[in-house]
Image: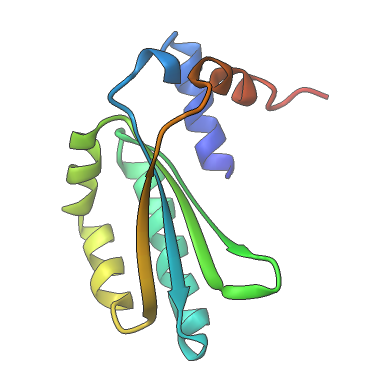
Amino acid sequence: MKFCITILLAILSSSITLAQNPGMMVRIAEIEVHANHLEAYKTFLEEEARASIQLERGVICIYPMFQKGAPTQVRILEIYASREAYEAHLRTPHFQKYKTGTQQMVKSLKLVDMDALDPKTMALIFSKHGRK
C-alpha cells in the first residue's frame, strides 16, 4: 500500500489527478488460490506487485489483499495510467514469471473492470495520507 500511496501522491503533486485522466484503467482481480499452494502463491504475488510498482511508470497501484477469515480469497486492486500501460504490464518479465509460476496454484480468476463513482473526490482520498 505504501508504494501505491507514494505513486499516487507523486501524480497528485504534478497536478495530474484521477479525474483528469479518463483513460485510466481500474480493475479488481478476484482470485481463489488452492489452499495447499497459498504460501508459494503469496511469495509470487508479493514479488510481482513490488516489481510492477517500482519498475513500471504506468502501473499506479497493484494492491493485493485477502478476505478476513478466508486467506485463499485474494483480491487485487489494480490501477493503470492507461490501457496501453496495462498491456505493457502483461508483457513484463516479472508479470510473466508470476503468471506462469502461479498457473497451477489458482483455482479461479475473475477480472472486474471498474469505473470511479466520484473521480473528483478520489484525489482527496490520497491527499489525506500523512496527516496527523
The image quarter in which residue 30 lies: bottom left
Percent from the top left, x then y, of residue 110?
Answer: 36, 62
* 84 to 105, vertically: above or below: above
**Outermost residue toward the top?**
15
**Residue at the image position 22 percent from the left and 35 percent from the top:** 83
Looking at the picture, tell me which residue is in the foreground, 80 or 43: 80
Residue at image position (27%, 68%) is 99
Q: Is residue 83 above or below residue 8?
A: below
Position of 61 compared to 99: left or right? Answer: right
Near-viewer residue (101 or 78): 78
Picture layout, residue 104 above or below residue 16: below
Residue plotted at (51% across, 27% down): 117
In the rendered image, residue 26, in percent from the top left (x then y), is placed at 39, 38
In the picture as drawn, the residue positioned furthest to the right comes out as 132
Q: Is residue 75 left or right of residue 95?
A: right
Residue 69, how many percent across, how many down? Answer: 70, 73
Residue at far front of view: 117
Figure coloring: rainbow
Q: Quadrant of residue 27?
A: top left
**Number of numbered callouts drawn:** 0
Residue at 27% across / 59% down in the picture? Answer: 95
Dividing the image into 4 quarters, which one contains the N terminus? Answer: top right
Q: Position of residue 25 (x, y in %)?
A: 33, 35
Q: Is residue 30 left or right of residue 84?
A: right
- Quarter occupied by the C terminus: top right
